[in-house]
Amino acid sequence: MASRTSAKTHTMRALMELRQRITKGELPGGTRLFEVAMAEDLQISRTPVREAMSRLAEEGLLERAPNGGFMVRSFAYADVLDTLELRGLLEGTVARLAAERGVSDAKLREITEIVRKLDEVFGDEPGEVDFEAYSDLNGQFHDALAALPGSATFERELARVKSLPFASPSAFLPNEGRLSAFRRSLAIGQEQHRELVAAIAAREGARAEALAREHALAARRNLEYIFSTEHSEVTTVPGLELVAPAEK
Amino acid sequence: MASRTSAKTHTMRALMELRQRITKGELPGGTRLFEVAMAEDLQISRTPVREAMSRLAEEGLLERAPNGGFMVRSFAYADVLDTLELRGLLEGTVARLAAERGVSDAKLREITEIVRKLDEVFGDEPGEVDFEAYSDLNGQFHDALAALPGSATFERELARVKSLPFASPSAFLPNEGRLSAFRRSLAIGQEQHRELVAAIAAREGARAEALAREHALAARRNLEYIFSTEHSEVTTVPGLELVAPAEK
DNA sequence: ATCACTGATAATGTATACATTGGGCTGGGC
DNA sequence: GCCCAGCCCAATGTATACATTATCAGTGAT
């Protein structure tokens, strides 16, 4: 999950810095970004700043402003819900395609191995879960899933959506109060991982699609629950400042 | 459908020029693009060329090459099929969301009006269809559809996919030999437009989704037919050089 | 008071010179 | 003949000066 952008050039440094500021919520949605200001701030010239902004626009974190320039994309509550829905849609389709088109033994073995490692993370102690290890392996699972049908198109689209800061289930970590419920939901998710791989191996397209969709939509329901119960203060949205429904 | 990029700045000129060359097939998929060469060719400096390439990467026509620079995205047969599938998926979802969430009277009136105008295009003469007028109105219909549920996320994704050169049904125009069959398929499509609007108005989500998906997938089936019957020489793919399945 | 013009200003657009990097080619050593 | 080092060139990365444009405030006439 860690940003693999290994800065060396100024562009990369600016890219990381900007991405961090956006996902940390320091730059709320709708904020116009100015090349000069950012360049002075980072002690570099406008050129790499512009380049970094351009790449962030590709990632979907920035939008091009009407008359030139960029602004931070606004992640209103509804946008986040829809993005999670979109992820479910794409993962469901990828699972269906994998089942329909068939998957090579190598790929099947690979994803099965990831599921096995995930099993290990849950371990023998019922309450103990290494969140970091889980999150890492979970990411690997979903990457492997996206690659299963061998469709460059869907793999790319899914990668784009997943790269958004809130598109991961782990984006909404609970505090101590809801930890046990959260662990339970992870266990359920792991069960779904197993079933999904089985469905794909059995070439059951419709079932694979439903399972993957259901699995991905858990994050959406989680978020909806959080907002509906006004318990947003017990939740850590890492850096992302969500705009509540009413505000828009 | 016409590129609405009204060039004035050098960036815009380069953008149009490059887009045209790519969609015309002058620059086959995988071709690496060099800033200097393009700059000399267009008699401008590297800066606007770079900017144009960056925007084309956002559009999805270019990809960033591993060690800097850009290359033309390869539109292999499988990629095109998957992209059309993706469009169907998105339009189906948008239709379902519109039905589920409800649509304002104004929007419903707007899209109904477009369907009415489309009816006019088919006119009284059974065989006569003004392709240009049809294509324009058809584009309006699909834009209006994408906007129906009021989801910025899905509207943007759909816009991105639709902007790809082959994502439109009209991308694969038949020659004289298959004209009548083509006209028939347009008539069927128009019937689907009407049914789709009715389903959305009636709040029938599942039906709306199925109809929209079916409608969008017609282009996919059309393309599959063309390739399967090896009649590719009777087809005009405007500018787009498709890579046949075997080559990949 | 309102409008239209105009200038200043602040932002992006553009050109160009220079820096850096990475990959291929050539040369010598073994 | 093979391998490796080092150069060289081509391509992108970066800085900076200058051009252009859009916005807005101020000022004048009506």
Image: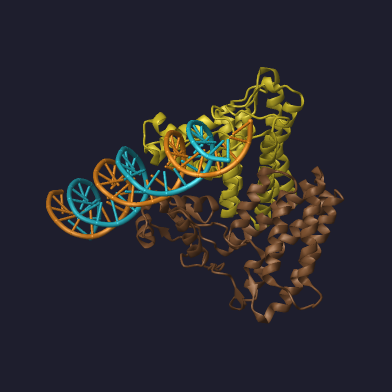
Chain colours: A brown, B yellow, C cyan, D orange
Question: Is residue B111 shown above or below A62?
Answer: above
A22 displayed left or right of A117: left
Q: Quadrant of residue C14?
A: top left
Outermost residue toward the right in this view: A202
Outermost residue toward the bottom in this view: A177
Q: Position of residue A18 (x, y in %)?
A: 47, 60
Q: Position of residue A120 (x, y in %)?
A: 79, 68
Query: Does the image show residue B162?
Result: yes
Q: Quadrant of residue A245?
A: bottom right
B136 displayed left or right of B173: left
Q: Which of D23/B191 is in front?
A: D23
Locate the N terminus of chain A and report the quarter of the image it occupies.
Answer: bottom right
Q: Which of A193/B155 is in front?
A: A193
Q: Which of A132/C23 is in front?
A: C23
Question: Is residue A188 shown above or below B201?
Answer: below
x 80%, y 43%: residue: A101
Query: Does the image show residue A221?
Result: no
x 66%, y 54%: residue: A86
Q: Position of residue B57 (x, y in %)?
A: 53, 43
Total residue callouts? 0
Q: Position of residue B225 (x, y in %)?
A: 75, 28
